[in-house]
Image (cartoon, helix red, strand yellow):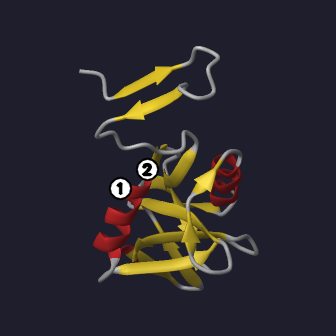
């Protein structure tokens, strides 16, 4: 059974899409999940909201520098170093539009990823090296 039927016959009166029980979304819109090991993926609004809800009791958020991109992560996993703090793991990235959190779109995914990656440092411990995000 087709959930979306698109009919275009150059008839402005009858042309259009008939939508039945289908959830629509903008193609290039979502939140960025990015990890300190370089892996990343884009999630839709529903999954982003679920992640934010799950972080509600343990969450830590901060802007990435002077940008409008905001990272949210598990605050219980922050590592305190002698002169600062860092985080190893994955974060969710969204933007603040002056009113509230909004989804990323278009080139913002790459811009946010570059900003995140520019703040990575290398930690060494117990014979291992790994990347960490340096927190403000």
Residue 124 visible to an observer of this rendering: no
Classify residue 11 as left or right of residue 86: right
Residue 52 pos. (x, y %): 38, 70
Q: Quadrant of the N terminus?
A: top left
Comparing 29 with 20, the one in front is 20
Residue 31 pos. (x, y %): 51, 55
Identify which residue is drawn at 61% across, 62% down: 121
Identify which residue is drawn at 69% across, 59% down: 115
Residue most extreme to the left: 1
Quick check: marks 2 and 1 in contact, CB under 8 Å? yes
Asked which secondary structure carries label 1, the reply is: helix
Classify residue 93 as left or right of residue 48: right
To which residue does mark 2 refer? 44
Among the 4 quarters of the image, the one containing residue 46: bottom left
User: Badge 2 local density, few (<14 within 10 Å), some, or many (20+)?
Assistant: some
Residue 130 pos. (x, y %): 48, 54
Residue 94 pos. (x, y %): 56, 64
The numbered dot on residue 47 is: 1
Where 112 falls versus 26 (above or below)?
below
């Amino acid at each position: 059974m087709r959930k979306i039927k698109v009919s275009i016959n150059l008839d402005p009166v009858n042309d259009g899409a008939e939508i039945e029980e289908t959830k629509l979304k903008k193609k290039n819109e979502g939140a960025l999940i990015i990890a300190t090991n370089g892996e990343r993926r884009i999630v839709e609004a529903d999954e982003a909201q679920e992640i934010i809800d799950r972080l509600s009791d343990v969450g830590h958020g901060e802007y990435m520098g002077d940008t409008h991109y905001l990272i949210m992560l598990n605050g219980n996993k922050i590592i305190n170093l002698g002169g600062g703090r860092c985080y190893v793991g994955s974060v969710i990235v969204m933007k603040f539009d002056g009113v509230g959190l909004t989804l990323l779109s278009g080139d913002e995914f790459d811009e946010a990823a570059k900003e995140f990656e520019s703040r990575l440092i290398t930690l060494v411990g117990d014979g291992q090296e790994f990347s960490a995000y340096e927190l403000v």
